[in-house]
Amino acid sequence: MSRRTMTNLFRVLAASAVAAVAVVVAPAVAYAAPNFKAPFPCGQRWTYSHHSAEVRLALDFVRADGGVTNNTPQVASADGVVRHHSQPSGAGNYIVIDHGGGWTTYYFHLNTFSVPNGAYVRQGQQIGLTGSTGNSSGAHIHYEQLLNGVGQTIRINGVSLAPYPGSYHQRYLTSDNCGQSAAARPMGGSPTDFTGDGRDDIVAFTHGSLADVYVSTSTGSGFAGTSVKWNDFFGLSGETTLTGDFNGDGRDDVVAFTHGTLADVHVALSTGTAFAGATKWHDWFAPGAEVPAVGDFNGDGRDDIVTFTRGSTNDVFVALSNGSAFVGTEQKWHDFFGLNGEFPAVGDVNGDGRDDIIVFTQGPNTLADVHVALSTGSGFGASAKWHDLFAVGNEQPRVGDINGDGRDDIVTFTCDTNADVYAATSTGTSFAGTTVKWHDYFCTAGEFPYLGDFNGDGRDDIIVFTKGTTNDVHVALSTGTTFGPATKWHDYFGLNGETTL
């Protein structure tokens, strides 16, 4: 029985029970929690405690690394929509972030707000400055995680912080909330050949007040250029930036989804040496916390856009490119795909020239499934399981053609102390291989991995942006059956907080 069939059956049974016994209420669906990270900036060390008189399952944080707590930025622990609040006699200035699926986080006692009310923010983005407004005896972060309005024991990177200490300097937390997390930013694959020479390049969106876009082009054995600016105002903070060939000229362009209440989509076309001025290609797509992606879904040679609504509907909408705009606001191509906590992606997995949709459920070993819905050119077909053990937990899955047979495959990076890379190749009807390791040391914690054909041989390779203090870029080329040794292709590209592809 499919997941959708089981859900519908549950709804029917629940409705029948309510009709038979009026006091029986169907339980709320418990959506998987986002992969919450620390609510303070990358690399900082804070100590935390819980007051015995506090009835909420909250933790208070103060800095323990020599820095000053007051006016230190607070950052979003996961993606979501910001709401401003004020309670002078209690929480002071505070923010609630709605992450979807019933999950929210609270940030109390802020000195100031850093983002507008109703803004869509990304994990690691600054939302305010730590203070002591309201009923507070000193500057600190009061932080909570709630599901359907009920406080939950706080978990960071999936690990519970319980039992809570009763005073500071008993337990500590160092933040790895470095501004780009695959679990919070599903980016399974997006093409980056900006010059049209057949080799994928790399791009960095700085966001922030400058919103610059830098490109370093591939030479086949390295990336050339450190500070080559291709656009000086594109991709503001909180926007999702991706890439694709939207006008079908063979050069990949850049796209920004504003989210929020506007939900506009802007495109800047590549000239081969720069991105032209941004123009609006759609005025209502991927609002709020929806997850957008890019792919050629009708096979006409122009990349289109797709959004996964998640939440309670789990719908999938597509707007097709006509070469100068994306057409269609409510063109639903699937009505149940990509639940909260799952990782959606796009790729042509059966090699028919049309991109399909893929979802990694990312549960434990028993639930780490991969489902595919194939494109018909005007919709996505029924969801089918193509793999039953891949991309477990917080691993970072990606999609690309790693063996050059014209069908996209799946790759997962453990990005931990093991730093393993596993691959499962497409047969056209499934992904083959469960524990086939293609590299045994690539992508450690805090780094950001990706795929691309960087030497132009028709096979996608793996790349990692180290971020942190080094900001190096390493590539391991595909041989068709494994990834070769990692080599440094750039020594300063993609800083913390920037989006890198």
Image: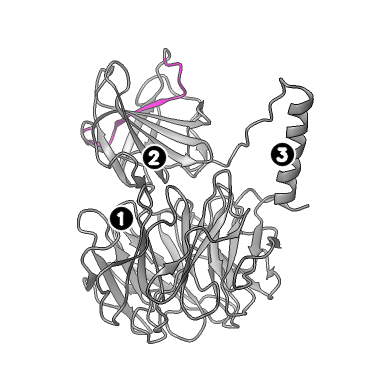
Amino acid type, residue under disc 3 in the picture: Arg
Q: CA distance from mark 1 to mark 3?
A: 44 Å
Q: Return the residue at label 3.
A: 11
Label 3: which secondary element? helix
Rendering quarter of residue 430: bottom right
Q: CA distance from mark 1 to mark 2?
A: 15 Å
Task: Give x and y (percent) for residue 296.
Answer: 51, 74
Main SS class of the magenta portion in the image: loop
Q: Is residue 391 above or below residue 110?
A: below
Q: Which residues are magenta?
A: 54-68
Label 2: which secondary element? loop
In reply to whether residue 222 is colored magenta, the answer given is no
Q: Is residue 120 above or below residue 188?
A: above
- Residue for point 52% across, 75% down: 483
Q: Residues within 10 Å of mark 1 (few under 14, many from 20)?
A: many
Q: Residues within 10 Å of mark 2 (few under 14, many from 20)?
A: many
Q: Is residue 404 left or right of residue 197?
A: right
Q: Is residue 408 left or right of residue 247?
A: right
Question: Does the image show residue 439?
Answer: no
Mark 2 or mark 3: which is in front? 3
In reply to whether residue 59 is colored magenta, the answer given is yes
- Residue for point 31% across, 79% down: 217
Amino acid type, residue under disc 1 in the picture: Asn
Earlier residue among tags 1 and 2: 2
Q: Is residue 277 left or right of residue 176?
A: left
Q: Is residue 325 above or below residue 119?
A: below
Q: Return the residue at label 1.
A: 496
Question: Does the image show residue 194?
Answer: yes
Q: CA distance from mark 2 to mark 3?
A: 36 Å
Task: Give x and y (percent) for residue 165.
Answer: 43, 23
Q: Return the residue at label 2.
A: 38
Quarter holding the C terminus is bottom left
